[in-house]
Amino acid sequence: MLYLKESRKSIDEVGTAIEEAAKKRKFGVLTVHNLKETMKKKGVEFEKECRIFEICNPQQAKKVLEADTRISTALPCRISVYEDGGTVKIATIKPTAQLAMFGRKDLASVAAEVEKTIIEIMDEAAG
């Protein structure tokens, strides 16, 4: 259900690499949530670095949304980059696992294709 990679790069380097790898594969980074900064603005001290990249391929999103708008609750896809025990980790919930919650076996091939691409993005960014 969870795909997890480790990287020797810094969080900033991984973030830049995610953006570049996503663009090469026709995925866009819609936004990046910096949890440490966001929580600080809300008056909550959170010491760990954690950034969440929301990514999307509009053509793939259109396919699943036209078939079942409920799937909008699982979009866009997210890649989390965080520090844990001195190591930078990159994680995502696999799209195939998310789609399974909706019981839409007819969309399994789309989820598998998106998952393959997200794993490629993560693997490249981690390298």
Image (cartoon, rainbow, N blue to C red):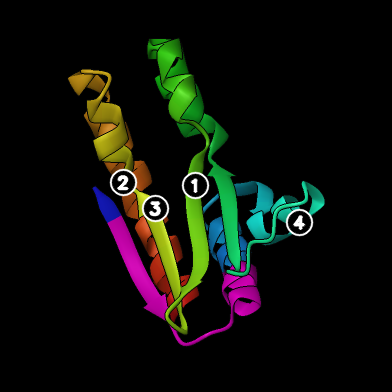
Considering the image in quadrants, where does the C terminus appear?
A: bottom left
> Which numbered disc flags the more N-terminal residue, 4 or 1?
4
Q: Quadrant of residue 74?
A: top left
Circle 3 Cα neighbour tier, 10 Å, few/some/many (<14 / 14–19 / ≥20): many
Residue underneath mark 3 = 92
Distance, label 2 to label 4, CA atoms, is 30 Å
Look at label 1 and name its amino acid.
Arg
Lateral position of residue 84 relative to residue 110, left or right: right
> Which numbered disc flags the more N-terminal residue, 3 or 1?
1
Tell me whether the residue at label 4 lies in contact with that at label 3, contact meaning CB atoms closer than 8 angstroms.
Answer: no
Residue under the image location 62 percent in, 78 percent down: 13
* Secondary structure under the numbered disc 2 in the rendered image: loop
Dot in front, 2 or 4: 4
Residue under the image location 41 percent in, 54 percent down: 118
Tell me whether the residue at label 3 lies in contact with that at label 1, contact meaning CB atoms closer than 8 angstroms.
Answer: yes
Distance, label 2 to label 3, CA atoms, is 6 Å
> Residue 40, which numbered label?
4
- Residue 35 is situated, as x and y percent measured from the top left of the image, at 64, 55
> Residue 78, which numbered label?
1
Tell me whether the residue at label 2 lies in contact with that at label 3, contact meaning CB atoms closer than 8 angstroms.
Answer: yes
Residue underneath mark 2 = 94
Q: Is residue 79 above or below residue 70?
A: below
Distance, label 2 to label 1, CA atoms, is 9 Å
* Secondary structure under the numbered disc 1 in the rendered image: strand
Relative to the observer, which residue lies in front, 21 or 97? 97
Look at label 2 and name its amino acid.
Lys
Distance, label 3 to label 1, CA atoms, is 6 Å
**Residue 117 seen from this side:** no
Q: Which residues are magenta?
A: 3-17
